[in-house]
Image (cartoon, rainbow, N blue to C red):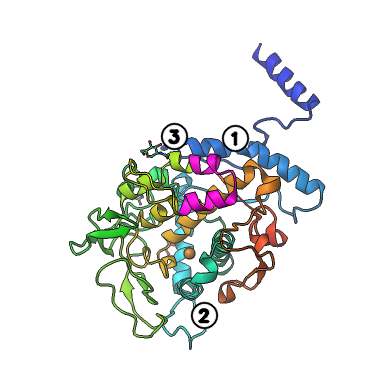
């Protein structure tokens, strides 16, 4: 009986010219660890894949995919969904970057000691272009791509950059696969530091979750941040010896891993962000500065919450936050939310630019010593074929 129905459904969808619902699964390899049930955004993302497939089919037919297909797209996964071997490969490549020679100009950044620090230095000195209304989404998309490209081309990494699904860290972030401090985590919490009492977030306060000191467990326990700080949010971050922050200021990585902060970025909030933002300006405002909601004690906005799930120094310092590798997990997640939003109506949303601070289609993104190509901003809007196919990723 079932097979007859199956054949009937398949036949009728073929007749209707409709792509079978789950066809994308033959193109994109889904890998889940089973520990976390799918949340509302995960489900929305899976449901959106049929649209993504139709969009790509149209793009391919028009010859506009630049060689990017769902079959060859890089797959960015949640850290917890990766195998131990994939996590080890990623950690090894990160350590390699932390030991590779820098490319940033020495006279401007005498404190930069590794290829890894190059990214801190760029972020600190180009904060304006990276964070204005036009730049925020596309420039960070390119920044994450540049970092992923360095891991792959300079350190032999074969995979793609992981993301952190904030909702998975709302209950017990400290014991998660990402932060538990073991050899296959991205390092542990900071040691307890009673001097760290929390930070102001708009009119609210994020209370310390008991960390705030140096990360002493996991693969990055010996890693030192060197440039900065830019605008530290913690007590006792030593001043940089050089004005502008480019000097050598070696210090441990500090964190306060905080599940309560993740409550500002639950799947419900992300789901509402994606489904209720009818235009990119609303999406932008809701992500960064949600409307005041006095009955919500976690009303910090998804972007802020993502940064302060581990916070600290350099991670919580808006200028040098890429000095904690968690930065890239957070920005990959933001890119994922933007991408799912775009893919609800790809024809009109891929090129939709935030207009709150003026528009510009001639704007270029120049990441200087991070990656060679200077690219038009709209090429970094298109995650499936942008910039000659350099952008070619899906999130699962
Ligand atoms: C990662 O690096 C460690 C230590 O250098 C090494 O023992 C291990 O084989 C590497 N793992 C992979 C998957 O490359
Ligand atoms: C590290 O923690 C993860 C998540 O709990 C676990 O799967 C893994 O086996 C642990 N690895 C080691 C080396 O203890
Ligand atoms: C305000 O926050 C409360 C508690 O989280 C929530 O139930 C409610 O939906 C929010 N209101 C709006 C308009 O988002
Ligand atoms: Cu940034």
The residue drawn where x is 29% and y is 57% is 256
The residue drawn where x is 41% and y is 53% is 306
The residue drawn where x is 32% and y is 63% is 312
Mark 3 or 1, closer to the camera: 1
Give above or below for 119 relative to 57. below
Residue interval drawn in magenta: 271-288
Q: Position of residue 50 (x, y in %)?
A: 66, 36
Q: Position of residue 391 (x, y in %)?
A: 65, 58
Tell me which numbered mark, 3 or 1, is placed earlier along the sequence: 3
The residue singled out by tag 1 in the image is 47
Provide the secondary structure element on which disc 2 rests: loop
Q: Position of residue 88 (x, y in %)?
A: 45, 56
Tell me the quarter of the picture where residue 4 sits: top right
**Along the horizontal axis of the image, is 188 left or right of 82?**
left
Ligand 4: does it lie within 8 Å of the C-beta at label 2? Answer: no
Q: Nearer the viewer, residue 242 or 19?
A: 242
Estimate the spatial distance between the alpha carbons at disc 2 and disc 3, rounded to whole Å: 43 Å
Tell me the quarter of the picture where residue 252 sits: bottom left
The residue drawn where x is 25% and y is 69% is 235
The residue singled out by tag 2 in the image is 104
Provide the secondary structure element on which disc 1 rests: helix
Estimate the spatial distance between the alpha carbons at disc 3 and disc 1, rounded to whole Å: 16 Å
Q: Nearer the viewer, residue 34 or 110?
A: 110
Give above or below for 358 relative to 71. below
The residue singled out by tag 3 in the image is 37
Mark 1 or 2, closer to the camera: 1
Is the C terminus in the top left, top right, bottom left or bottom right quadrant?
Answer: top right
Q: Position of residue 10 (x, y in %)?
A: 73, 23
Question: Label 1 crowding class (10 Å Cα cut-off): few <14, some 14-19, many 20+?
Answer: some
Q: Main secondary structure of the magenta part?
A: helix
Q: Nearer the viewer, residue 123 or 136?
A: 136
Tags 1 and 2 touching, CB below 8 Å = no
């Amino acid at each position: 009986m079932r097979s007859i129905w199956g054949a009937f459904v398949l036949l009728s969808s073929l007749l209707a010219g409709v792509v079978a619902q789950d066809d994308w699964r033959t193109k994109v390899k889904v890998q889940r660890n089973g520990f976390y049930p799918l949340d509302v955004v995960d489900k929305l993302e899976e449901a959106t894949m049929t649209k993504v497939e139709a969009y790509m089919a149209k793009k391919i037919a028009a010859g506009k995919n630049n060689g990017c297909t769902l079959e060859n797209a890089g797959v960015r996964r949640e850290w917890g969904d990766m195998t131990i071997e994939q996590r080890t490969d990623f950690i090894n490549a990160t350590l390699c970057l932390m030991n590779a020679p820098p490319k940033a100009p020495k006279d401007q950044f005498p404190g930069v000691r590794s290829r890894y620090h190059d990214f801190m230095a760029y972020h600190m000195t180009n904060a304006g272009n990276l964070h204005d209304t036009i730049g925020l989404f596309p420039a960070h998309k390119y920044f994450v791509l540049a970092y992923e490209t360095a891991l792959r081309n300079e350190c032999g990494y074969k995979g793609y950059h992981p993301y952190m699904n904030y909702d998975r860290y709302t209950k017990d972030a400290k014991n998660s696969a990402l932060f538990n401090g073991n050899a296959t985590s991205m390092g542990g919490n900071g040691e307890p530091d009673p001097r760290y009492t929390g930070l102001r977030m708009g009119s609210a306060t994020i209370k310390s979750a008991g960390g705030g000191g140096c990360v002493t467990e996991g693969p990055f326990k010996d890693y030192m941040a060197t440039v900065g700080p830019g605008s530290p949010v913690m007590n006792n971050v030593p001043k940089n010896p050089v004005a502008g922050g480019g000097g050598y200021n070696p210090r441990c990585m500090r964190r306060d891993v905080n599940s309560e902060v993740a409550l500002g970025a639950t799947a419900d909030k992300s789901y509402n962000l994606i489904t209720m933002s009818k235009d990119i300006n609303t999406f932008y405002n809701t992500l960064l500065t949600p409307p005041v909601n006095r009955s919500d004690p976690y009303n910090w906005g998804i972007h802020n919450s993502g940064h302060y799930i581990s916070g600290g120094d350099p991670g919580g310092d808006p200028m040098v936050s890429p000095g904690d590798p968690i930065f890239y997990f957070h920005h990959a997640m933001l890119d994922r939310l933007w991408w799912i939003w775009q893919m609800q109506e790809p024809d009109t949303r891929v090129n939709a630019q935030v207009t709150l601070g003026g528009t510009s289609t001639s704007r270029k993104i120049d990441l200087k010593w991070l990656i060679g190509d200077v690219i038009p901003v709209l090429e970094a809007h298109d995650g499936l074929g942008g910039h000659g196919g350099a952008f070619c990723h899906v999130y699962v």
